[in-house]
Image (cartoon, rainbow, N blue to C red):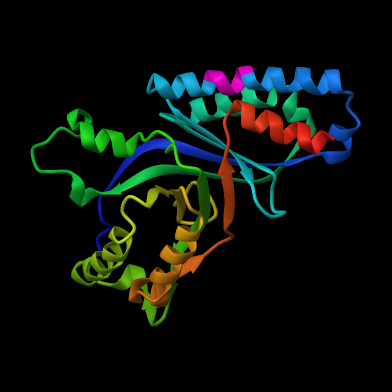
Amino acid sequence: MPAPHTLDGWYVLHDFRAIRRQAWKNTDPHTAAAVLRDFSAFAQGEMEAQRQRLGSFGQFVVAGTKADLLFVYMRPTIGELNDVKARFEATRLADFTERAYSYVSVVELGGYLAKPGVDIEQDEALQLRLKPPVPEMRYVCFYPMNKRRTHPDNWYMLDEDERRKHLIAHGQIGRQFAGKVKQIISGSVGLDDWEWGVTLYADDPIHFKKLIYEMRFDESSARFAEFGPFYVGEQVDVEGLTKWMMTLHG
C-alpha cells in the first residue's frame, strides 16, 4: 500500500532522569543551593527560547520509580537537540543524575491537513501544531506505541479507506476530551525503538486514564495498537523544581 504523506515539525527529545540520591543527600546545603541556581539559569534560558519560538521546553517531576525527572525539548534540528543535551550535561545538576530513559521523535501531523495550494510554512495554524509550545497544563503522560504488523491485524496492509475509517472513529473519542487533554503526536520510525511517541497534557491526571481506557475499546486500538511503558509526571516551574530537589536533599 502507498505510504500516507505526513507533515513533520520540530524534533523532540524526552529526557528522563533518575537522581543519584546518596550523592545528592551527601552534598552540603550551600553546594546544593549553588547547583540548583546553576540549573535554574539553564532552565530560564530554555524557557526564553520557547518564548521566542526558537524551541520548546518543559520540566516535570515523574510519579512512580521509573524516573525522577522528565525534561522535554523541541528544536528545529537534531543538531540543536544535541546542543541542548550538551548544555544540560554541562550543568552541575547533571552530575547528580543518571539517564533512566530517553525518546527521540519529530512532531507529526497527517498530510491530509495540508490544504491544496496552501504554503505550509505560511499557515499559522499548522505551524503552531508542528512547532508547539509545551502546554501550560499541570500533568503529563508519555508513552510510545506501534501499529501491529502481524496477521491478520496488520495495519500496514489495510487499504487507505479502511485506515481512514479507523482513524475517524479513533479521533471522535479524542474529541470528547477537547479542552481537558492536549495531545502531541511525534513520529519516531527510524528515529527510536517505537513508531510514535504520544505526549498528553491535562490539569487532572484522571483524564489520562479515562481517555486511554475509552480508546482501548476502539477497534483501531483493540486490533492494531501496541503500547510501550507509560510515564506520568507533574509540571513544575523553576521554583517548584528547586523546592522538590531540596525536599529530596533533606
Q: Is residue 150 left or right of residue 125?
A: right
Start-end of magenta stretch: 41-45
Does residue 133 appear to the left or right of 122 in the view shown? right
Task: Give the camera-side residue of 176 and 171.
Answer: 176
Q: Is residue 217 above or below residue 175?
A: below
Q: In which quarter of the image is the N terminus?
A: bottom left
Counting from the top left corner in percent of width and height, residue 196 is at: 44, 54
Indicate whether residue 110 is drawn in magenta. no
Numbered label tally? 0
Q: Residue 93: x and y, percent?
A: 73, 27
Check the image and name the residue furthest to the left: 117
Residue 97 x/y as whole percent: 75, 36
Q: Which residue is drawn at 31% across and 53% down?
A: 178
Name above or below for residue 146 compared with residue 201: below
Residue drawn 45% across the image and 70% down it: 213
120 relative position to 151: left or right: left
Residue drawn at (30%, 61%) of the image: 176
Magenta-span inclusion, residue 42 = yes
Magenta stretch mostly in which secondary structure? helix
**Placement of the C terminus among the 4 image quadrants:** top right
Residue at screen point 39% across, 69% down: 215
Residue in the foreground of this view, choosing between 238 and 217? 238
Q: Where is residue 3 in the image (x, y as percent from the top left)?
A: 28, 58
| Residue 85 in which image quadrant | top right
Decide: is 247 above or below 210: above
